[in-house]
Protein backbone atom coordinates (compact mmCIF):
# COMPACT_ATOMS: atom_id res chain seq x y z
CA UNK A 1 0.00 0.00 0.00
CA UNK A 2 1.27 3.49 -0.84
CA UNK A 3 2.05 5.58 2.26
CA UNK A 4 0.39 8.96 2.81
CA UNK A 5 1.89 11.96 4.61
CA UNK A 6 0.70 15.42 5.58
CA UNK A 7 2.66 18.26 3.95
CA UNK A 8 0.46 21.33 4.35
CA UNK A 9 -2.03 22.80 6.84
CA UNK A 10 -4.57 25.63 6.66
CA UNK A 11 -7.28 26.71 9.10
CA UNK A 12 -9.78 29.37 10.02
CA UNK A 13 -11.16 29.02 13.53
CA UNK A 14 -12.77 31.14 16.24
CA UNK A 15 -9.21 31.61 17.56
CA UNK A 16 -8.15 33.29 14.32
CA UNK A 17 -7.30 33.00 10.66
CA UNK A 18 -4.26 30.77 10.12
CA UNK A 19 -2.95 27.58 11.70
CA UNK A 20 -0.08 29.26 13.59
CA UNK A 21 -2.31 31.90 15.14
CA UNK A 22 -4.95 29.34 16.11
CA UNK A 23 -2.39 26.93 17.57
CA UNK A 24 -0.54 29.60 19.58
CA UNK A 25 -3.77 30.86 21.11
CA UNK A 26 -5.01 27.31 21.75
CA UNK A 27 -1.82 26.43 23.64
CA UNK A 28 -2.05 29.70 25.57
CA UNK A 29 -5.50 28.68 26.85
CA UNK A 30 -7.45 31.35 24.95
CA UNK A 31 -11.12 30.83 24.10
CA UNK A 32 -12.84 31.99 20.89
CA UNK A 33 -16.44 31.75 22.06
CA UNK A 34 -18.62 34.88 22.35
CA UNK A 35 -22.17 36.03 22.80
CA UNK A 36 -24.14 36.46 19.56
CA UNK A 37 -27.13 38.13 21.23
CA UNK A 38 -26.06 41.58 20.01
CA UNK A 39 -25.65 40.56 16.35
CA UNK A 40 -28.08 40.97 13.47
CA UNK A 41 -31.52 39.34 14.08
CA UNK A 42 -31.48 40.35 17.75
CA UNK A 43 -35.24 39.76 18.02
CA UNK A 44 -34.79 36.13 17.01
CA UNK A 45 -31.73 35.60 19.21
CA UNK A 46 -33.72 36.77 22.23
CA UNK A 47 -36.14 33.86 21.86
CA UNK A 48 -33.38 31.28 21.87
CA UNK A 49 -32.17 29.36 24.92
CA UNK A 50 -28.54 29.47 23.67
CA UNK A 51 -26.87 32.68 22.46
CA UNK A 52 -23.20 31.74 22.44
CA UNK A 53 -21.11 30.73 19.43
CA UNK A 54 -17.57 30.40 18.14
CA UNK A 55 -17.49 33.07 15.46
CA UNK A 56 -14.52 34.02 13.27
CA UNK A 57 -12.90 37.28 14.40
CA UNK A 58 -13.53 39.95 11.77
CA UNK A 59 -10.71 42.19 10.55
CA UNK A 60 -7.56 42.24 8.46
CA UNK A 61 -5.58 39.21 7.34
CA UNK A 62 -2.36 40.66 8.85
CA UNK A 63 -4.05 40.63 12.24
CA UNK A 64 -5.15 37.00 11.90
CA UNK A 65 -8.75 38.00 11.25
CA UNK A 66 -11.23 37.46 8.46
CA UNK A 67 -12.45 39.75 5.74
CA UNK A 68 -13.46 38.11 2.48
CA UNK A 69 -11.83 40.80 0.32
CA UNK A 70 -8.38 39.69 1.53
CA UNK A 71 -8.95 36.31 -0.12
CA UNK A 72 -11.49 36.73 -2.92
CA UNK A 73 -12.37 39.26 -5.59
CA UNK A 74 -15.82 40.82 -5.41
CA UNK A 75 -17.37 38.56 -8.03
CA UNK A 76 -16.26 35.40 -6.23
CA UNK A 77 -17.37 36.76 -2.91
CA UNK A 78 -20.87 37.23 -4.34
CA UNK A 79 -20.88 33.84 -6.02
CA UNK A 80 -19.66 31.79 -3.09
CA UNK A 81 -21.38 30.72 0.10
CA UNK A 82 -19.51 31.64 3.25
CA UNK A 83 -18.46 28.04 3.89
CA UNK A 84 -16.97 27.97 0.40
CA UNK A 85 -15.13 31.24 1.03
CA UNK A 86 -13.57 29.76 4.16
CA UNK A 87 -12.68 26.60 2.25
CA UNK A 88 -10.97 28.59 -0.53
CA UNK A 89 -8.94 30.58 2.00
CA UNK A 90 -7.94 27.54 4.10
CA UNK A 91 -6.96 25.65 0.93
CA UNK A 92 -4.79 28.57 -0.18
CA UNK A 93 -3.01 28.54 3.19
CA UNK A 94 -2.49 24.77 3.07
CA UNK A 95 -1.15 24.82 -0.51
CA UNK A 96 1.24 27.69 0.28
CA UNK A 97 2.37 25.83 3.39
CA UNK A 98 3.02 22.68 1.32
CA UNK A 99 4.67 24.63 -1.49
CA UNK A 100 2.51 22.71 -3.96
CA UNK A 101 1.68 24.84 -7.03
CA UNK A 102 1.47 22.43 -9.95
CA UNK A 103 1.82 23.89 -13.44
CA UNK A 104 2.04 20.80 -15.63
CA UNK A 105 -1.02 18.94 -16.83
CA UNK A 106 0.35 15.71 -15.37
CA UNK A 107 0.66 17.17 -11.88
CA UNK A 108 -2.75 18.85 -12.06
CA UNK A 109 -4.35 15.54 -13.03
CA UNK A 110 -2.68 13.85 -10.07
CA UNK A 111 -4.05 16.41 -7.57
CA UNK A 112 -7.59 16.10 -6.21
CA UNK A 113 -9.89 17.71 -3.66
CA UNK A 114 -12.05 16.07 -1.00
CA UNK A 115 -13.83 18.67 1.11
CA UNK A 116 -17.25 18.77 2.67
CA UNK A 117 -19.61 20.62 4.94
CA UNK A 118 -22.22 19.44 7.42
CA UNK A 119 -25.00 21.94 6.88
CA UNK A 120 -23.82 24.29 4.14
CA UNK A 121 -25.45 27.59 3.27
CA UNK A 122 -28.45 27.83 5.57
CA UNK A 123 -28.64 31.64 5.42
CA UNK A 124 -29.11 31.74 1.66
CA UNK A 125 -31.81 29.09 1.87
CA UNK A 126 -33.56 31.08 4.59
CA UNK A 127 -33.35 34.44 2.79
CA UNK A 128 -34.42 33.00 -0.54
CA UNK A 129 -37.36 31.17 1.02
CA UNK A 130 -38.63 34.43 2.51
CA UNK A 131 -38.08 36.40 -0.69
CA UNK A 132 -39.79 33.71 -2.76
CA UNK A 133 -42.76 33.55 -0.42
CA UNK A 134 -43.16 37.34 -0.57
CA UNK A 135 -42.36 38.15 -4.17
CA UNK A 136 -42.19 34.92 -6.17
CA UNK A 137 -40.04 33.49 -8.96
CA UNK A 138 -38.18 36.67 -9.95
CA UNK A 139 -36.61 36.88 -6.46
CA UNK A 140 -34.74 33.62 -6.85
CA UNK A 141 -31.12 34.27 -7.85
CA UNK A 142 -29.48 32.22 -10.61
CA UNK A 143 -26.72 31.68 -8.03
CA UNK A 144 -29.14 30.09 -5.56
CA UNK A 145 -28.47 26.44 -6.42
CA UNK A 146 -24.68 26.72 -6.81
CA UNK A 147 -24.55 28.57 -3.49
CA UNK A 148 -26.41 25.77 -1.76
CA UNK A 149 -24.61 22.68 -2.99
CA UNK A 150 -22.19 21.17 -0.49
CA UNK A 151 -19.70 20.05 -3.14
CA UNK A 152 -19.11 23.58 -4.44
CA UNK A 153 -16.31 24.12 -1.90
CA UNK A 154 -14.37 21.29 -3.51
CA UNK A 155 -15.54 22.45 -6.95
CA UNK A 156 -14.30 26.02 -6.56
CA UNK A 157 -10.91 24.89 -5.23
CA UNK A 158 -10.42 22.63 -8.26
CA UNK A 159 -11.42 25.43 -10.65
CA UNK A 160 -9.09 27.94 -9.02
CA UNK A 161 -6.01 25.71 -9.35
CA UNK A 162 -6.94 23.40 -12.23
CA UNK A 163 -6.84 20.25 -10.09
CA UNK A 164 -8.28 17.40 -12.15
CA UNK A 165 -7.87 14.51 -9.71
CA UNK A 166 -10.80 13.08 -7.74
CA UNK A 167 -13.26 15.82 -6.72
CA UNK A 168 -15.34 14.68 -3.80
CA UNK A 169 -17.50 16.16 -1.04
CA UNK A 170 -18.28 14.30 2.14
CA UNK A 171 -21.33 15.24 4.17
CA UNK A 172 -21.68 13.16 7.30
CA UNK A 173 -22.74 15.82 9.82
CA UNK A 174 -20.05 16.33 12.44
CA UNK A 175 -17.88 13.51 11.09
CA UNK A 176 -17.48 15.28 7.72
CA UNK A 177 -13.96 16.65 8.22
CA UNK A 178 -12.55 13.35 9.48
CA UNK A 179 -14.20 11.31 6.72
CA UNK A 180 -12.91 13.78 4.11
CA UNK A 181 -9.30 13.35 5.29
CA UNK A 182 -9.67 9.59 5.66
CA UNK A 183 -11.29 9.09 2.26
CA UNK A 184 -8.71 11.38 0.61
CA UNK A 185 -5.88 9.34 2.13
CA UNK A 186 -7.39 6.24 0.54
CA UNK A 187 -7.56 7.92 -2.88
CA UNK A 188 -3.80 8.41 -2.58
CA UNK A 189 -3.13 4.96 -1.14
CA UNK A 190 -5.06 3.33 -3.99
CA UNK A 191 -3.29 5.41 -6.66
CA UNK A 192 -6.18 7.63 -7.75
CA UNK A 193 -4.12 10.72 -6.88
CA UNK A 194 -0.65 11.69 -5.62
CA UNK A 195 -1.81 14.82 -3.77
CA UNK A 196 -5.19 15.55 -2.16
CA UNK A 197 -6.50 18.77 -0.67
CA UNK A 198 -8.79 17.53 2.11
CA UNK A 199 -10.91 18.91 4.91
CA UNK A 200 -14.17 20.46 6.00
CA UNK A 201 -15.77 23.86 6.20
CA UNK A 202 -18.82 25.24 7.98
CA UNK A 203 -20.60 28.54 8.43
CA UNK A 204 -24.18 28.28 9.61
CA UNK A 205 -24.37 30.47 12.71
CA UNK A 206 -27.90 31.70 12.17
CA UNK A 207 -30.87 31.82 14.56
CA UNK A 208 -32.61 29.08 12.58
CA UNK A 209 -29.66 26.71 13.00
CA UNK A 210 -29.45 27.42 16.73
CA UNK A 211 -33.20 27.01 17.02
CA UNK A 212 -32.95 23.55 15.46
CA UNK A 213 -30.02 22.40 17.58
CA UNK A 214 -31.65 23.86 20.69
CA UNK A 215 -34.86 21.94 19.92
CA UNK A 216 -32.87 18.74 19.69
CA UNK A 217 -31.51 19.65 23.16
CA UNK A 218 -27.93 19.65 22.02
CA UNK A 219 -26.77 23.18 22.90
CA UNK A 220 -25.24 24.69 26.03
CA UNK A 221 -27.90 26.95 27.56
CA UNK A 222 -26.60 27.73 31.06
CA UNK A 223 -23.74 30.07 30.21
CA UNK A 224 -25.21 32.80 28.00
CA UNK A 225 -23.95 35.35 30.55
CA UNK A 226 -20.43 33.84 30.52
CA UNK A 227 -19.73 32.63 26.97
CA UNK A 228 -16.12 31.57 27.56
CA UNK A 229 -17.26 29.05 30.19
CA UNK A 230 -19.96 27.53 28.01
CA UNK A 231 -18.00 24.79 26.25
CA UNK A 232 -16.59 22.52 28.97
CA UNK A 233 -15.89 19.03 27.67
CA UNK A 234 -15.60 16.29 30.31
CA UNK A 235 -16.44 18.78 33.10
CA UNK A 236 -19.13 17.79 35.61
CA UNK A 237 -21.17 20.93 34.78
CA UNK A 238 -21.17 20.57 30.98
CA UNK A 239 -24.62 21.03 29.48
CA UNK A 240 -24.36 20.93 25.68
CA UNK A 241 -22.22 21.98 22.74
CA UNK A 242 -21.47 25.47 21.45
CA UNK A 243 -21.96 25.97 17.72
CA UNK A 244 -18.96 27.37 15.83
CA UNK A 245 -17.73 28.07 12.31
CA UNK A 246 -14.53 27.83 10.31
CA UNK A 247 -12.54 25.51 8.09
CA UNK A 248 -9.64 23.08 8.24
CA UNK A 249 -7.72 21.89 5.19
CA UNK A 250 -4.70 19.60 4.90
CA UNK A 251 -2.51 18.71 1.94
CA UNK A 252 -2.02 14.95 1.83
CA UNK A 253 0.67 13.48 -0.35
CA UNK A 254 2.04 10.11 -1.37
CA UNK A 255 5.28 9.60 0.59
CA UNK A 256 7.71 9.18 -2.35
CA UNK A 257 6.12 12.14 -4.13
CA UNK A 258 6.67 14.33 -1.06
CA UNK A 259 10.25 13.11 -0.61
CA UNK A 260 11.11 13.63 -4.27
CA UNK A 261 10.23 17.31 -4.09
CA UNK A 262 11.79 17.82 -0.67
CA UNK A 263 8.51 18.69 1.02
CA UNK A 264 8.34 19.18 4.79
CA UNK A 265 6.48 16.24 6.32
CA UNK A 266 4.36 17.00 9.37
CA UNK A 267 3.19 13.46 10.06
CA UNK A 268 2.11 10.24 8.41
CA UNK A 269 -1.57 9.28 8.08
CA UNK A 270 -1.31 5.85 9.69
CA UNK A 271 -4.86 4.70 10.20
CA UNK A 272 -8.49 5.43 9.42
CA UNK A 273 -11.46 3.62 10.89
CA UNK A 274 -15.20 4.13 10.46
CA UNK A 275 -18.29 2.68 12.08
CA UNK A 276 -22.00 3.27 12.64
CA UNK A 277 -23.72 3.14 16.00
CA UNK A 278 -26.90 1.71 14.45
CA UNK A 279 -28.71 3.06 17.47
CA UNK A 280 -30.37 6.52 17.47
CA UNK A 281 -30.41 9.73 15.40
CA UNK A 282 -28.75 11.94 18.02
CA UNK A 283 -27.92 9.92 21.15
CA UNK A 284 -24.84 7.72 21.40
CA UNK A 285 -24.86 4.17 22.71
CA UNK A 286 -24.10 4.56 26.40
CA UNK A 287 -21.11 2.25 26.40
CA UNK A 288 -19.57 4.11 23.46
CA UNK A 289 -19.67 0.99 21.28
CA UNK A 290 -19.61 2.84 17.96
CA UNK A 291 -16.71 5.03 18.95
CA UNK A 292 -14.73 2.05 20.21
CA UNK A 293 -15.18 0.22 16.93
CA UNK A 294 -13.99 3.24 14.93
CA UNK A 295 -10.86 3.67 17.07
CA UNK A 296 -10.09 -0.07 17.00
CA UNK A 297 -10.38 -0.09 13.22
CA UNK A 298 -8.11 2.95 12.84
CA UNK A 299 -5.43 1.31 15.00
CA UNK A 300 -5.76 -2.04 13.25
CA UNK A 301 -5.51 -0.28 9.89
CA UNK A 302 -2.25 1.33 11.00
CA UNK A 303 -0.79 -1.67 12.84
CA UNK A 304 -0.75 0.37 16.07
CA UNK A 305 -1.24 -1.03 19.60
CA UNK A 306 -3.38 1.00 22.05
CA UNK A 307 -0.39 1.48 24.36
CA UNK A 308 1.46 3.23 21.52
CA UNK A 309 -1.17 5.99 21.34
CA UNK A 310 0.33 9.01 23.09
CA UNK A 311 -2.53 11.47 22.61
CA UNK A 312 -6.22 11.37 21.68
CA UNK A 313 -8.02 14.49 20.45
CA UNK A 314 -11.54 13.57 21.53
CA UNK A 315 -14.72 14.47 19.72
CA UNK A 316 -16.20 15.36 23.17
CA UNK A 317 -18.55 18.23 22.41
CA UNK A 318 -19.45 19.07 26.03
CA UNK A 319 -22.76 17.18 26.06
CA UNK A 320 -23.56 15.06 29.13
CA UNK A 321 -24.20 11.82 27.19
CA UNK A 322 -21.73 12.15 24.32
CA UNK A 323 -18.68 12.90 26.47
CA UNK A 324 -19.52 10.04 28.85
CA UNK A 325 -19.93 7.56 25.99
CA UNK A 326 -16.65 8.59 24.41
CA UNK A 327 -14.90 8.48 27.77
CA UNK A 328 -16.07 4.88 28.21
CA UNK A 329 -14.97 3.99 24.70
CA UNK A 330 -11.51 5.51 25.17
CA UNK A 331 -11.01 3.70 28.47
CA UNK A 332 -12.18 0.41 26.98
CA UNK A 333 -9.72 0.81 24.12
CA UNK A 334 -6.74 2.06 26.10
CA UNK A 335 -7.04 -0.28 29.09
CA UNK A 336 -7.83 -3.36 27.01
CA UNK A 337 -5.52 -5.78 25.24
CA UNK A 338 -2.07 -4.27 24.48
CA UNK A 339 -3.15 -1.16 26.36
CA UNK A 340 -1.95 0.90 29.30
CA UNK A 341 -1.97 -0.12 32.99
CA UNK A 342 -3.75 2.86 34.47
CA UNK A 343 -6.27 5.39 33.18
CA UNK A 344 -4.16 8.26 34.52
CA UNK A 345 -1.70 7.43 31.69
CA UNK A 346 -4.33 8.07 29.01
CA UNK A 347 -3.74 11.55 27.54
CA UNK A 348 -6.93 12.87 25.96
CA UNK A 349 -8.20 16.40 25.46
CA UNK A 350 -11.09 18.11 23.76
CA UNK A 351 -10.14 21.36 22.06
CA UNK A 352 -13.84 22.24 21.74
CA UNK A 353 -13.54 24.06 25.07
CA UNK A 354 -11.56 26.69 23.18
CA UNK A 355 -13.22 26.76 19.75
CA UNK A 356 -16.65 25.19 20.23
CA UNK A 357 -18.05 22.67 17.77
CA UNK A 358 -17.29 23.45 14.12
CA UNK A 359 -19.70 20.71 12.95
CA UNK A 360 -18.57 19.69 9.44
CA UNK A 361 -15.20 21.40 9.91
CA UNK A 362 -14.55 20.00 13.40
CA UNK A 363 -12.90 16.76 12.28
CA UNK A 364 -10.51 18.58 9.95
CA UNK A 365 -9.48 21.31 12.39
CA UNK A 366 -9.03 18.76 15.18
CA UNK A 367 -7.01 16.47 12.90
CA UNK A 368 -4.69 19.45 12.40
CA UNK A 369 -4.31 19.74 16.19
CA UNK A 370 -3.54 16.00 16.42
CA UNK A 371 -0.94 16.41 13.63
CA UNK A 372 0.69 19.38 15.38
CA UNK A 373 0.80 17.41 18.65
CA UNK A 374 2.86 14.78 16.81
CA UNK A 375 5.10 17.37 15.23
CA UNK A 376 5.71 19.54 18.28
CA UNK A 377 5.34 17.10 21.21
CA UNK A 378 2.79 19.24 22.98
CA UNK A 379 -0.79 18.45 23.98
CA UNK A 380 -3.45 21.17 23.67
CA UNK A 381 -5.63 21.70 26.76
CA UNK A 382 -9.28 21.07 27.59
CA UNK A 383 -10.61 24.42 28.79
CA UNK A 384 -13.11 24.85 31.64
CA UNK A 385 -12.45 21.42 33.10
CA UNK A 386 -12.63 22.15 36.80
CA UNK A 387 -14.59 19.27 38.32
CA UNK A 388 -14.32 15.59 37.53
CA UNK A 389 -17.16 13.15 37.86
CA UNK A 390 -17.01 9.46 38.67
CA UNK A 391 -15.32 7.42 36.01
CA UNK A 392 -13.64 10.43 34.41
CA UNK A 393 -10.12 9.65 35.56
CA UNK A 394 -7.93 10.00 32.45
CA UNK A 395 -5.46 12.85 31.98
CA UNK A 396 -7.69 15.31 30.08
CA UNK A 397 -4.95 17.98 29.86
CA UNK A 398 -7.11 20.29 32.01
CA UNK A 399 -6.77 24.06 31.52
CA UNK A 400 -3.15 24.19 30.31
CA UNK A 401 -1.07 22.52 27.61
CA UNK A 402 1.32 19.70 28.54
CA UNK A 403 4.59 18.63 26.95
CA UNK A 404 4.89 14.97 26.01
CA UNK A 405 6.70 12.89 23.40
CA UNK A 406 3.96 12.11 20.86
CA UNK A 407 4.77 9.40 18.34
CA UNK A 408 1.13 8.55 17.65
CA UNK A 409 -2.03 10.64 17.96
CA UNK A 410 -5.66 9.81 17.29
CA UNK A 411 -8.49 12.20 16.38
CA UNK A 412 -12.12 11.16 16.90
CA UNK A 413 -15.21 12.53 15.17
CA UNK A 414 -18.82 11.46 15.60
CA UNK A 415 -21.94 12.70 13.89
CA UNK A 416 -25.71 12.68 14.09
CA UNK A 417 -27.04 9.58 12.45
CA UNK A 418 -24.57 7.57 14.52
CA UNK A 419 -21.58 7.82 12.21
CA UNK A 420 -18.15 7.55 13.81
CA UNK A 421 -14.63 7.95 12.44
CA UNK A 422 -11.11 7.94 13.87
CA UNK A 423 -7.87 9.03 12.25
CA UNK A 424 -4.41 8.01 13.48
CA UNK A 425 -1.26 10.02 12.74
CA UNK A 426 2.35 9.17 13.54
CA UNK A 427 5.75 10.80 13.33
CA UNK A 428 7.33 10.12 9.97
CA UNK A 429 10.73 8.58 10.44
C1 LIG B 1 -29.89 37.53 4.34
O1 LIG B 1 -30.69 38.59 4.73
C2 LIG B 1 -30.13 39.40 5.76
C3 LIG B 1 -31.20 40.37 6.22
O2 LIG B 1 -31.75 41.03 5.14
C4 LIG B 1 -28.88 40.07 5.21
O3 LIG B 1 -28.30 40.89 6.18
C5 LIG B 1 -27.90 38.98 4.81
O4 LIG B 1 -26.73 39.54 4.26
C6 LIG B 1 -28.55 38.04 3.83
N1 LIG B 1 -27.65 36.92 3.62
C7 LIG B 1 -27.30 36.45 2.44
C8 LIG B 1 -26.39 35.28 2.40
O5 LIG B 1 -27.70 36.94 1.40
C1 LIG C 1 -21.11 7.74 17.13
O1 LIG C 1 -21.78 8.78 16.51
C2 LIG C 1 -23.02 9.13 17.17
C3 LIG C 1 -23.75 10.15 16.40
O2 LIG C 1 -23.62 11.41 17.03
C4 LIG C 1 -22.73 9.73 18.45
O3 LIG C 1 -23.95 10.09 19.06
C5 LIG C 1 -22.02 8.75 19.26
O4 LIG C 1 -21.53 9.46 20.36
C6 LIG C 1 -20.85 8.12 18.55
N1 LIG C 1 -20.51 6.98 19.30
C7 LIG C 1 -20.12 7.05 20.53
C8 LIG C 1 -20.48 5.88 21.32
O5 LIG C 1 -19.51 7.98 21.01
C1 LIG D 1 -4.26 4.39 38.83
O1 LIG D 1 -3.36 5.33 39.39
C2 LIG D 1 -3.93 6.13 40.40
C3 LIG D 1 -2.94 7.23 40.77
O2 LIG D 1 -1.63 6.72 40.79
C4 LIG D 1 -4.31 5.24 41.58
O3 LIG D 1 -4.91 6.01 42.61
C5 LIG D 1 -5.30 4.19 41.08
O4 LIG D 1 -5.63 3.29 42.10
C6 LIG D 1 -4.76 3.43 39.88
N1 LIG D 1 -5.83 2.61 39.32
C7 LIG D 1 -5.67 1.33 39.03
C8 LIG D 1 -6.85 0.67 38.37
O5 LIG D 1 -4.65 0.73 39.26
Image (cartoon, rainbow, N blue to C red):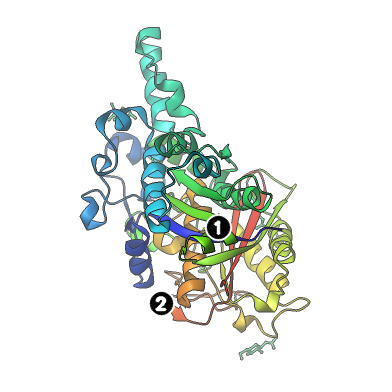
Q: Is residue 114 left or right of residue 273?
A: left
- Look at the image and tell me in which quarter the N terminus lies: bottom right
The relative height of residue 60 versus residue 228 in the rendered view (above or below) is: above
Q: Is residue 373 left or right of residue 321?
A: left
Q: Residue at x 45, y 66 (%)?
A: 264
Ligand 3 contact, mark 2 (Cβ < 8 Å): no
Residue 402 appears in view: yes
The relative height of residue 380 versus residue 135 in the rendered view (above or below) is: below
Number of the label disc, if any, that sits on residue 134: none
Observer-nearest residue: 224 or 420?
420
| Residue identified by numbered label 1 | 257
Count the labels in the image.
Answer: 2
Task: Please provide percent x and percent y for residue 298.
Answer: 69, 62
How far is the residue under mark 2 from the one under mark 1?
38 Å
Q: Earlier in the sequence, mark 2 or mark 1?
A: 1
Q: Is residue 385 left or right of residue 327?
A: left
Task: Please provide percent x and percent y for residue 108.
Answer: 50, 41
| Residue identified by numbered label 2 | 400
Element type at marker 2? loop
Element type at marker 1? helix
Contact, CB < 8 Å: mark 2 with mark 1?
Answer: no
Residue 233 appears in view: no
Q: Residue at x 64, y 44 (%)?
A: 192
How many residues crowd mark 1 within 10 Å: few (<14), some (14–19), many (20+)? Answer: some
The relative height of residue 316 versus residue 133 in the rendered view (above or below) is: below
Observer-nearest residue: 222 or 274?
274
Amino acid sequence: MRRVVVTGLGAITPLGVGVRRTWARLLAGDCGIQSVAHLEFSAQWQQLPSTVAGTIPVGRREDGKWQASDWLDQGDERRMAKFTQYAIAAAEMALNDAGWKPHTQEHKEATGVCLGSGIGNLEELYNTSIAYEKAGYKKVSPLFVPQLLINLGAGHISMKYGFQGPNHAVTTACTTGAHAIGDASRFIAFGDANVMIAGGSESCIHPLALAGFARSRSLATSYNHDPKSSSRPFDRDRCGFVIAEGAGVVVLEELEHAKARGARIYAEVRGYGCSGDAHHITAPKEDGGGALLAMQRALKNGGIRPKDVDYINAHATSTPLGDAAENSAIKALMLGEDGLDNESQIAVSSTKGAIGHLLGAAGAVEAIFAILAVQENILPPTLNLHNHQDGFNCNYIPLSAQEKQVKVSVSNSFGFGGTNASLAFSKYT
